[in-house]
Image: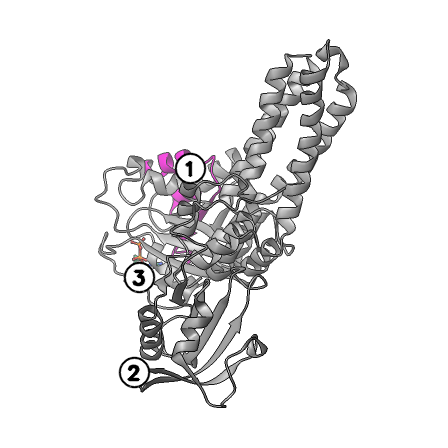
Amino acid sequence: MTKTTSTTAIGNFREDTIAAISTSLGPSGIGIVRLSGPDAFSIVHRLFQPAENKPFSPAQYRRLRYGWIVENGERIDEVLVSCMPGPHTYTAEDVAEINTHGGAISVKRVLACVLRCGARLADAGEFTRRAFLNGRIDLAQAEAVMDIIDAKTEQAQTQALQQLSGELSSEINALKESMLHLLSHVEYAINFMEDAQEELPTKPMLEEAEAILQRMDALLQDANSGRLIREGIATVIAGRPNVGKSSLLNALLRRERAIVTDIPGTTRDAIEESYILDGVCLRLIDTAGIRDTEDTVESIGVTISRSQVAQADLILAMLDGSRPFSKDEESFLQEVADKPVIILLNKQDLPLSPSMQSARDRWQDEKPDIPWIALSAKEKTGLDRLKDAILERIFHGAAPKQPAMLSNMRHIDRLTKAKEALEEARRALASGVVLDALEVDLRDSYNRLADITGERAGEDVLDRIFHDFCVGK
Ligand code: GDP
């Protein structure tokens, strides 16, 4: 299947030369200014003064050359440069890289020289976008590049690397091939058969559809784990003021990030911190401080917004075991009971209040699937039990060690829709429905798959995807 090579890219991607700083600007050993496009080499040639007096010729391509960037007779920095002719480069165009000294000044000065020589400052993600538009990688692979950069854990990076190497893409391409095969039967029947309905090889087609559906199911099965590895587990710590939410955050992170006080409501901002548990990133959100927002879950009084509950992958509902169990806590627990929730009975270093004890007994009786974990955020006891409970609740045990094929919400959504359309087609096929309707469903399913690899991606889709990239990638 051919990938799009439309000229709908930003600017004239085949004609102009882009440049950007591809490393971060903090103190570091080296910085890299990268150029891509037809003038990449001539720009470097104008600015670079080699230490050895060898000509700047194709024989020197793909070699690191040592020298200086010089503008109007002034040495701007001591550098190493490399010129890599397309198409075997990151963008599939001519690419040059200038290694400067690290820190902000050298790279910025060299970039300024490059821009004065006619390069255009690259947009966010434009190098990767060109790699896509030039057909070197597909859209799923381009998205994997960003996932590698954004990865907070080794697992997330491994998973993304697998996608970059094309494993997901070849699965999707195989599904597309099978889908085209199904479609070809329908189209042949529509175009060439007199009694099209009769002529359709229904049985083998149903078998093929079934086989595709099974492969889709297998991909979707570990997609949620894949997503959680990629994005981290959005974990909301909810509870009334003063139950110990900030203390728990600090106990897990082992530092005083949230201000802990015994005056209710003193934590002003919702705080998000990353905590790595068994190689998986927990994105811990302390909800204290959002008490003024309107969209709060009223039953708990103050400290959590409905959208946070809705978006959470995990809710840690915290109670103060030393205090009486309140009515609003009961209704909050009822509200979140169907979601992935763990109830934390904090302050286990203090005596357990009788009403809390009976609430726990009743809940454990009525909803045995919801774990109750006794702990003390202050004394840091019960934390291991909490960590085990989180892994159990989210991954039914330990975090998966094998990377998932699917992890990006966009891909999961498209594959789910492709599957739904194919299920519709299977029903139609089995009940002998009009061929045109069958064709529409099969084509719809195919198109959803093609969205994953970006076969038909328009500029709006690309803008949305590459918008989140950093400049220089
Ligand atoms: P938040 O409002 O829910 O974030 O609660 P904080 O973390 O600010 O804690 C409120 C008060 O409870 C502070 O004085 C904490 O020291 C205290 N606290 C928190 N956890 C525990 C605990 O496990 N045991 C005891 N005895 N006190 C705790």
Would residue 316 be seen by someone viewing this image from the given angle?
Answer: no
Residue at screen point 25% across, 58% down: 262
Q: Residue at x 52, y 36 (%)?
A: 365
**Which residue in the structure is indicated by mark 2?**
72
**Residue at (43, 66) in percent of width and height:** 39
Quick one: label 2 or label 1, which is nearer the N terminus?
A: 2
**Count of marks overlaid on the render:** 3
Disc 1: which residue = 336
Given residues 466 and 382, the one toward you in this image is 466
Which residue is labeled 3 in the image?
258
- Does mark 2's beta carbon lie closer than 8 Å to ligand 1? no
Secondary structure at badge 1 equals: helix
Q: Looking at numbered disc 2 in the image, what kind of residue is underneath it?
A: Asn
Near-viewer residue (428 or 56): 56
Q: Secondary structure at mark 2?
A: loop
Identify the image quadrant of the N terminus.
top right
Residue 82 picture location, percent across and down: 51, 76
Residue 51: in sight, yes or no? yes
Callout 3: CB less than 8 Å from ligand 1 = yes
At label 3, the amino acid type is Ala
Instruction: Tell me which segment is drawn in magenta.
Output: 328-357
Disc 2 from disc 1: Cα separation: 68 Å
Q: Residue furthest bottom?
A: 52
- Where residue 185 appears, as percent x and y from the top left, is 72, 23
- Amino acid type shown at disc 1: Val
Which marked residue is nearer to the observer: mark 3 or mark 2? 2
Side (left or right) of 107 relative to 368: left
Q: CA distance from mark 3 to mark 2?
A: 53 Å
Say if the magenta span includes residue 347. yes
Marks 3 and 1: in contact by CB < 8 Å? no
Give the image location of residue 147, x and y in percent.
Answer: 50, 56
